Image (spheres, rainbow, N blue to C red):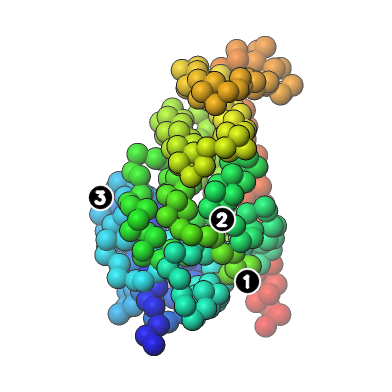
Amino acid sequence: MTRPLVSILIPAYNAERWIADSLRSAIAQTWEPKEIIVVDDGSTDRTLAIARGFESSQLRVVTQKNQGAAASRNTAYALSKGDFIQYFDADDLMAPDKIARQMEALGPCQSTRTLLSGSWGRFLYRYYRTQFIPSALWCDLPPTEWLKRKMQLNLYMQTATWLVSRELAEKAGPWDTRLLGDDDGEYFCRVLLACDRVQFVPEAKVYYRTSGPNSLSYIGDSDRKMVAQLCSMKLHIQYIRSLEDSQSVREACITYLQNWVYFFYPDRVDLVKQVEEMATSLGAKLQLPTLSWKAVWIGALVGRQRARRVQVFLGRIKWALGRSWDRILFQIESRKFGESL
């Protein structure tokens, strides 16, 4: 029997520091046959030049005007020919047998209605220190239960953990280009709607490079990202209720709204009101977030709305310091490792 072709689709924007390692990780995948498609989304650094240095009969690079990660994934998908789709970001890494493990888990029948997931962990520079910490999503689940756990427990799976058949991708439709941060969460909700079950493959490992305030999913004080996040939340609730509209599903939706209203409060009262109205339609009343003692103290000095901006700023500084320290340790440990050889 002919083995299925797997398409590894990589959107890239200003990723010159990481893309070479990510492409090596994609090329190193032991599953064959595979194709790799990189879409440079109008980068202003050397991302395109570096990616083109890897071009081969198996790896194709195209470029387009900057349109965002979702549009780049749509472009890559339109160019792909694979029976299975592996979405992969330009700063992450995969274990060499990640795809092979998932394809083998399907067995000889290779059901195209099964959605495959795998293990993932975070790192900054020292990928070899990545810890894989299981969550309630790290198991085989029916779609409704998977979504219920995601929303009630505030969990998610990193984009590259999934391996999607073309049949499921076609049923899900294109990535939503309106969404600036939670486009992957919304997209894989639609994939879940189309699948029969989720099969978890623990040996299929993904190394997720944490980008902190620089990541697309980071909301901070961005009005555009707040609006986009609320749009994604509305779709999440619509999707899970289309599968099941039980009391337990509604409770999961209420908890989901309660967890996320924090990101709009107190800067966007209009968005908070919409979240409250959604909760009311589900039969509940939300509790507005309480500010931490630090925020109260800062608020007394600069005002409540400015206090949130100060918190965001201080969070950026803390993350930058942690990242710089990890980079220093990575350089020291890499040097020692090299000397030991």
Residue beneath disc 2: 142
Q: Position of residue 317 (x, y in %)?
A: 61, 37
**Residue 93 position (above or below residue 298):** below
Mark 3 or 1: in front is 1
Looking at marks 3 and 2 on the same chain, the residue that comes earlier in the sequence is marked by 3
Q: Position of residue 314 (x, y in %)?
A: 63, 32
Q: CA distance from mark 3 to mark 2?
A: 39 Å
In the rendered structure, the answer to whether residue 48 lies left or right of residue 274 reads left
Q: Amino acid at mark 1?
A: Glu
Which residue sits at x=56%, y=55%? 142
In the rendered structure, the answer to whether residue 78 lies left or right of residue 140 reads left
Q: CA distance from mark 3 to mark 1?
A: 37 Å
In the rendered structure, the answer to whether residue 38 lies left or right of residue 97 reads left
The disc label shown at residue 65, or none? 3
Q: Quadrant of the N terminus?
A: bottom left
Which residue sits at x=59%, y=30%? 254
Looking at marks 1 and 2 on the same chain, the residue that comes earlier in the sequence is marked by 2
Q: Residue furthest bottom?
A: 1
